[in-house]
Amino acid sequence: MNKLFRSTADAKVTGLCGGIAEWLGVNATLIRLLVVLAALSSFGTVIILYFVGSMLIPKMPYSHF
């Protein structure tokens, strides 16, 4: 089972959407669009949850090749 991390390679703001996209195996743009649409329809509640999730979910550890 994959562990959820914030992405270091596919980060626009905090890397949370990129990490969720890697975890689910979907395109990060789709997750970002869903977050924006949810934020607009929830009167900002999703924005608060996004930053709380960014504080709780750890950053992906760097792997040495």
Image (spheres, rainbow, N blue to C red):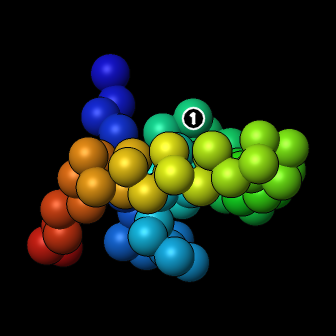
* Residue drawn at the location 40% of the way across and 63% of the way down: 7
Give the farthest residue toward the front.
Answer: 43
Left or right, 35 with respect to 64, comes to right
Count how many numbered circles sit on residues in the image: 1
Q: Considering the image in quadrants, where does the C terminus appear?
A: bottom left
Left or right, 55 with respect to 64, comes to right
Q: Considering the image in quadrants, where does the N terminus appear?
A: top left
Residue 38 visible here: no
> Where is residue 53 shown, x and y percent of the image?
39, 47
* Residue drawn at the location 22% of the way across and 53% of the way down: 58
* Residue drawn at the location 56% of the way across and 78% of the way down: 12
Q: Secondary structure at mark 1?
A: helix
State the residue in front, 63 or 10: 10
Q: Amino acid at mark 1?
A: Leu
Relative to 51, say whether 4 is above or below: above
* Residue drawn at the location 57% of the way across and 35% of the way down: 24
State the residue in front, 14 or 50: 50
> Where is residue 49 shown, x and y percent of the image?
50, 45
Relative to 2, say whether 45 is above or below: below
Corner quadrant of residue 2 = top left
Left or right, 55 with respect to 53, comes to left
> Where is residue 52 shown, x and y percent of the image?
38, 49
State the residue in front, 18 or 41: 41
> Where is residue 63 shown, x and y percent of the image?
18, 67
Left or right, 58 with respect to 33, comes to left
Corner quadrant of residue 59 = bottom left
Residue 44 visible here: yes
The residue labelled by disc 1 is 24
Relative to 19, say whether 45 is above or below: above
Give the farthest residue toward the top.
Answer: 1
Q: Residues within 10 Å of mark 1 (few under 14, many from 20)?
A: few
